[in-house]
Amino acid sequence: MKRQGHKKRNLVLSENATLRYLSFSALYLAQGIPEGITYFAIPAWLAMNGKTPLEIAGFVAVIGIPWSFKILIAPIMDRYTILSMGRKRPWIIFGQLGLILSFLSMGLVNDPLNNLNSLMVAGFILSFFGAFQDVATDGMAVDIVPVPEQARANGLMWGSKTIGISLSLLIGTFLINLLGFSTAIALLAISVAFIILVPICFRERKGEKIMPWTKGIASPLAETTQLKHWKQIFNSLLKVVLLPSTLMMLVAAFVLGLMYGLIDTLLPIFTIQELGWTNTEFSQAYSTTTIVGGVFGMFVGGALVDFFGDKRMITIYLIITTLIIVLMAFISDFWQIKMIIFGFIMLYYLFYVFHTIGIFAASMKLCWPVIAATQFTLFMALSNMGRAVGSGLVGTLKETMTWEYVFICIALAPLISILFINLIDFKKQRIAIAEFTIKGG
């Protein structure tokens, strides 16, 4: 009997660190697959087929919009759930189902090269369910992962997502060129479908149901942290948002999002239309470099943040990121050397993964557990809003200035964000949150 009980506990996320790491890594891998297709493979394919920077930037901006809606989704998840199945696990299952179906529906778009509006709509829906699953996964991570494990967990999660993006870009580009758009999308959707087994098979906490029709009860801890009234949710969110450290992180997240959107949208246009690469060459360069960044992020990024501290390492990573982008602007005479561009992409995404892990861990530390999903999502929503704005700016910037000046403009974002990151005070935030909790929210 003891042995059976031990095995049962091992399938509970709150009681098994290894299971937590593996489960969250798999769920983030699932998010990376559609992102690799929509943000990189399709824009590179469009660039290869002569679409203008404005058309490509417009597509990327539209698929980025649902990620800004996350702040509307999160309060619903904090307010409603099937509590006997866990606070966030039912939402993860629903989001994963939507991700699978919307991925498949994208493959049904007829003649996507000449039907960009329909492609945008399909990409928008796919991004919506990607954002939906992301909110639920992040909310469960904040609930389940202990503070000492958060930096390491974020390293594994973000590394897995980066690897998912890279592999889906590499494989997706190969399949699009070989078999056509529709078949490629359908085949990649199958890989996303397998990952739904992760939230189906594991419980959040001991004693909960696996499915609505199975035996189990709500965890007492989940019941105490579940908010039951909208007024309670919004009052709690307003209190914690008005704390200085929360405001500083919100501004930093938006500014960094601008950089993400600008670089991600710029790269396929810049390499294919300016430097004459093929979409296959771009996908190979991007995938190889970002897999390296993802692996280092998984095993080094989180550990460095744990050892040296969030703010210090984020600041170092962002200073290096600024220097990398500025250097790129001043070596335009060497842009035709592919190894130079390869090196830029590798270094940028290596430190992108590193500072993102730090930002995620720092954001989690700033969260109040009773509204963790909503608060953490607010940080991510501001980042994604910045990303959508940055994506949309690429075409405009390119029409008004040279690529050198575009890179210099982008380098301002990490530099500005450093100022706000260093105004964050984790100790004061914890004290304020403790006071809120004592007063009953």
Image: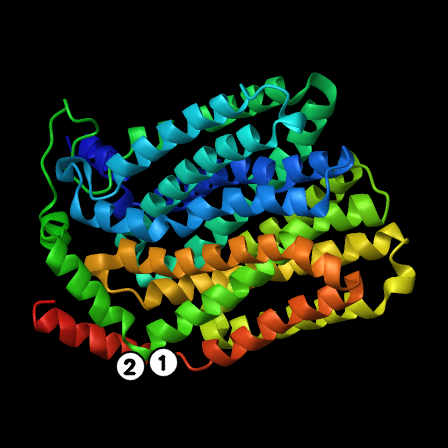
Cβ–Cβ under 8 Å for marks 2 and 1: yes
Taking the image as shown, residue 278 lies to the left or right of residue 426, namely: right
Q: Please identify the quarter of the rendering in which residue 351 is found.
A: bottom right
Q: Which mark is residue 425?
A: 1
The colour scheme of the drawn protein is rainbow
The spot of residue 259 in percent (x, y) is: 59, 62
Q: Could you tell me the amino acid type at mark 2? A: Lys
Q: Which mark is residue 41?
A: none
Circle 1 Cα neighbour tier, 10 Å, few/some/many (<14 / 14–19 / ≥20) = some
Q: Which mark is residue 428?
A: 2
Q: Please identify the quarter of the rendering in which residue 164 is found.
A: top right
Nearer the observer, 214 or 261: 261
Taking the image as shown, residue 352 lies to the left or right of residue 87, namely: right
Q: Which quarter shows the N terminus?
A: top left
Res. 299 in view: no
Residue in the picture at 48% in, 27% down:
103
What is the C-alpha distance between the residues marked 2 and 1?
Answer: 6 Å
Residue in the picture at 51% in, 77% down:
312
Q: Could you tell me the amino acid type at mark 1? A: Asp
Residue in the picture at 55% in, 22% down:
109
Res. 80 in view: yes
Number of residue marks: 2
The spot of residue 241 in percent (x, y) is: 28, 69
Circle 2 Cα neighbour tier, 10 Å, few/some/many (<14 / 14–19 / ≥20) = some
Taking the image as shown, residue 311 lies to the left or right of residue 375, namely: right
Q: Check disc 2 and report its element: helix, strand or loop.
A: helix
The spot of residue 21 in percent (x, y) is: 40, 46
Q: Check disc 1 and report its element: helix, strand or loop.
A: loop
Residue 379 vs 188, above or below: the answer is below
Nearer the observer, 189 or 191: 189
The spot of residue 391 in percent (x, y) is: 59, 53
